Image (cartoon, rainbow, N blue to C red):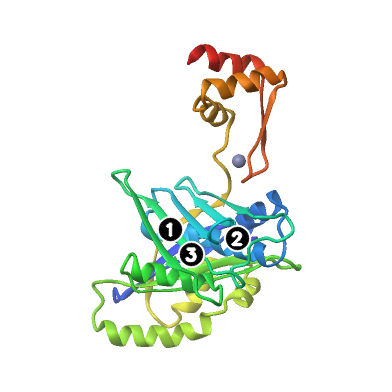
Amino acid sequence: MPEKDAVMRAMTNDGAFRIVAARTTDTVRGVVAAQKLSGAVANDIANLVTTAVLYRETMAPSLRVQCIVRFGEGGGQLVADSHPDGWSRGLVQSPSSDAPPDVRRKRATLEMMRTLPNSELHRGVVEVPESGNLSEAFMRYMQLSEQIVSMISLDSKIEGPTPATGGYVVQLLPEAAEAEAAMATMTRRLESFVDIGDRLQASDGSPAHLIEQIFEGMPFTWLHESSIRFGCQCSQLRVMTTLSLLDRSEVQELVDEGEPLSVGCDYCGASYTVEIAHLQGLLSAS
Ligand SMILES: [Zn+2]
């Protein structure tokens, strides 16, 4: 059976480690196709989407998260959203169309946001290392901002006959006995799981396969599986809601232009048309 995008979790039976692994191949394919991306920036947004999926599944499975790589004033940004319903999306905002922002050439920060159950926002920012390695940036964030020891690898092979994108987070659990020894063993083991691109390609990105390889020889228990997909939350209703926030004079200007308003979604490429009558409706409603 062909693999589908999914997140799987497992825990070692000694209670020392938890793993969350994701296949995001098709989700990323949707993001890359919607924005016609290629080259390094396509791989970067792929890894950022995987980051958002893994971050949500690790920290807040039932809440939404957003991850942003910012390139500083006027330098553009990469944005990834992951939603508890299973959809994720990504957006590359370039300062110019011929030069997408490159995390290996320009200093950037990684900003991670998640909604808390009381609907407050938890937000943390770390520097992306000079290498531009987003796995390391994500690890640094988990360490510094969430204080959770995590070993993380993300990888993405977008072009070629066997595209594969995915990643994993291995976490030392607080109740681990002999935590230092356990960490040392796991760190050694994960040395051969730093670059996972080839492994992902060989198994069609299967998160189950990745977990079985990483926990090989260690008794473990499967915990939970959830499916993920490319998606967006844009809708005609959201477009109308956004328009209703405009000043009356701005809406009046749109009406005066005398043409139906066309609004495109940068994330997924969907386009919406707002008829003049509906714009006029906004005027009478406000
Ligand atoms: Zn959309």
Q: Is residue 133 above or below residue 257?
A: below
Left/right of residue 111 with respect to residue 279 in the rendered view:
left
Q: Is residue 47 above or below residue 121?
A: below
Q: Residue furthest top?
A: 284
Disc number at residue 201? Answer: none
In the image, what residue occupies the spot 49% across and 70% down?
128
The residue that label 2 is drawn on is 45
Q: Ligand 1 quadrant?
A: top right
Instruction: Select label 3 or label 1 by which is in front.
Output: 3
Q: CB of mark 3 within 8 Å of CB of mark 2?
A: no
Left/right of residue 32 with respect to residue 218 in the rendered view:
right
Residue density around tag 2, few if under 14, some if 14–19, many if 20 or more, within 10 Å: many
Q: Is residue 144 above or below residue 58?
A: below
Q: For numbered disc 3, what is the local secondary structure?
A: strand
Front residue of this view, candidates 191 and 13: 191
Q: For numbered disc 2, what is the local secondary structure?
A: helix
The residue that label 3 is drawn on is 109
Disc 2/disc 1 C-alpha distance (Å) = 14 Å
Q: Position of residue 192 (x, y in %)?
A: 52, 85
Name the amino acid type tagged 3.
Answer: Thr
Q: For numbered disc 1, what is the local secondary structure?
A: strand
Left/right of residue 192 with respect to residue 117 in the rendered view:
right
Q: Position of residue 154 (x, y in %)?
A: 54, 70
Quarter location, residue 14: bottom left
Disc 3/disc 2 C-alpha distance (Å) = 14 Å
Disc 3/disc 1 C-alpha distance (Å) = 10 Å
Q: Is mark 1 within 8 Å of ligand 1?
A: no
Q: CB of mark 3 within 8 Å of CB of mark 1?
A: no
The residue that label 1 is drawn on is 112
Query: Sequence order check: which comes first, mark 2 or mark 1?
Result: 2
Q: Position of residue 235 (x, y in %)?
A: 58, 32
